[in-house]
Image (tube, rainbow, N blue to C red):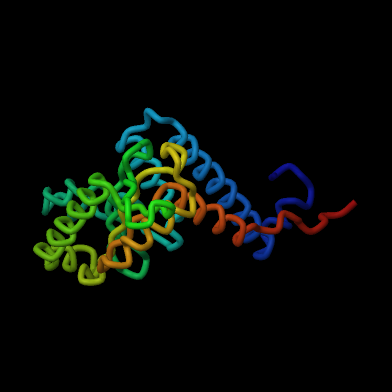
Amino acid sequence: MVTTEGLLDAVRQLDVAGRLSSLIEHAHRQQGLQQLVDAVNNPASSRDDLRAVVGQESWVFGGRYLPPYALESVYDQVPRLRDISLALVRTDGAIHIVDVNEANIDDLIVRVDGDDSTRRSYSVGARIQNAVNRVINQLRLLDEVTQVIEATLRVETRRALATVLIGHRSYLDDLDASELRTTLRTYSSHLSGIEVISYDELIRTGERALALDEPRAELPATGP
C-alpha cells in the first residue's frame, strides 16, 4: 500500500477508509459465520466447541456487543457467574445470557398425539425444558449480584434477557424447518424475557445481517 503510487492517498480519504474497514469487517463476519456453520454441521461438536464460536460471533444475534472478556472483572468478584454458559454485554448496557447447547439433539421436539390422528402436533422435549430452567436460575443469580455488576460495569441487570440456543433441523427425523420454528416460537411466547431458538434460526439471522450489511467494494480510481 505504501509503495503503490496514489493508493495511500486514496485510503487516507475518509470515505475510502470507511469502505475498506467495512469490507474487512464483512469478510471477518463471513468467515465467522462459516465457522459456526461448520461447527453445527459437525455432529461431534460439544457445548464448549459451539460456545467458543458463538462467543466470538455475538453479532449473529442482531445487536452490538462488547468484547467477550467484558465481564472478567465481575467474574473475579462473583465467581459463581462463571457457571453461566455465555454472558454478553450489549452496547446499550443490557446483559444477554446465552445458554449454548449442542446442535446434535435428536429428541429436541416430541410429537403429541391429539384427537385428530391426521394432524401432527409437537412439543418441546426435556432438554429444552431443562435449559430454560437453568437460564431462569442464571437470571435469578444476576438479580442477587446486581449491585456488584452495576458498580463494576455500569450496566443495568434488571434489563437482562436470555436466549436458549439448542438443536438443529438436520439432526431431527420427520420434522421440517417450519414445524421446528413454530414449535419453538409458540413455547417461547409463554416465557418472559427468554427466547428459545435453534441453530437454524441463528444462522439465518446471521445470513440476513450479512446480506443487509453488504459493503460496496469499489474504490475510486487513483489515476491511469
Q: Is residue 198 left or right of residue 72?
A: right
- Vertical arrangement, residue 120 with respect to residue 31, above or below: below
Residue farthest toward the right in the current orientation of the protein: 224
Of 138 and 128, the residue lying toward us = 128
The residue located at (43%, 49%) in the rendering is 57
Percent x, y of residue 68: 33, 50
Of 23 and 30, the residue lying toward us = 30
- Vertical arrangement, residue 117 with respect to residue 16, above or below: above
Percent x, y of residue 201: 46, 53
Q: Is residue 35 left or right of residue 93?
A: right
- Residue 10 image-quadrant placement: bottom right
Residue farthest toward the top in the current orientation of the protein: 44
Of 222 and 26, the residue lying toward us = 26
Q: Is residue 196 left or right of residue 215?
A: left
Percent x, y of residue 171: 42, 37
- Residue 49 image-quadrant placement: top left
Percent x, y of residue 224: 90, 51
Q: Is residue 64 left or right of residue 155?
A: right
* Quadrant holding the N terminus: top right
Of 215 and 100, the residue lying toward us = 100
